Each structure stands twice: as C-alpha cells, then as structure tokens.
Amino acid sequence: MIEYRVECQVNDEFAESWEEYFLNTHLDDVLGTGCFTGYQFTKDTDLSQEYTIFVTSYFCTSIDKLDFYNRNHADNLKADVLSKFEGKFKAYRNVFHILKSKTV
C-alpha cells in the first residue's frame, strides 16, 4: 500500500474556504480518478501560527497507480486548486510505502 501525503500550509484568512473546498469538492475529485482507494483529511490544532496546516493522505495499491495519477490527473487537479488559492498556501508532498497499519 502507498500513502501519497500532501501537507499544505494555508494562510489563516483562507483556511475556512480551503477546508470547505476540500471537503465538498477536491477530495472527491481526486478519489474520482480511480487511482486511490481512500483518503484521510486532517487539520492541525495549533492556533499559535499565522497559517493552518492541512494534511491529506491519499491511499493507493501500488506505485504504478500513483504514477498513473501523476501522469494523467495531477496537473488538472492542481490547476483547479491554484485557480482558487494561488499564492495563499505552500504545499509539500511525500510518498510512503505503508509497511504495517492497524486500527482498533
């Protein structure tokens, strides 16, 4: 299993609209590509900063699926985010191989 993690530092004045956009549009658009099996969307609770950190983890079954997503879908979805929030956030991306996971 692969985790594609995107951490975004969003200027506080846009955090509410960012959260709304992700919850109502972007997450389902990414999942709709068929490349991912699910996602987790989280928000930092530290209010002492000038920005809000949102972390989205997208899960897929193989690195090939992630490569397909990056080749065929990522540019359009990133452009959609930029059309609404350009200059209002910084994004950092990582890819992890999940070695073991368990929930109770």
Image (tube, helix red, strand yellow):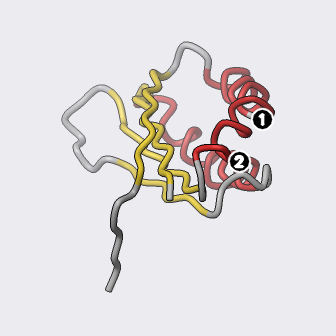
Q: Contact (CB < 8 A) between labels 1 and 2?
A: yes
> For residue 61, which quarter of the picture?
bottom right
Residue corresponding to mark 2? 30
Residue displayed at 56% across by 39% down: 18
> Is residue 91 shown above or below 65?
above
Q: Nearer the viewer, mark 1 or mark 2?
A: 1
Q: Secondary structure at mark 1?
A: loop
46 on left or right of 63: left
Of all residues, the one furthest to the left in this rendering is 48
Residues packed near mark 2 inside 10 Å, few (<14), some (14 to 19) or many (20 plus): some
Which one is nearer the viewer's eye here, 15 or 81? 81
x, y percent for residue 30: 71, 47
- In this view, the residue in front, 97 or 56, is 97
Q: Secondary structure at mark 2?
A: helix
Most foreground residue, 80 or 93: 93
Tag 1 residue:
73
Horizontal placement of 97 versus 20: left or right?
left
Residue in the image at 80% along x and 33% along y: 72
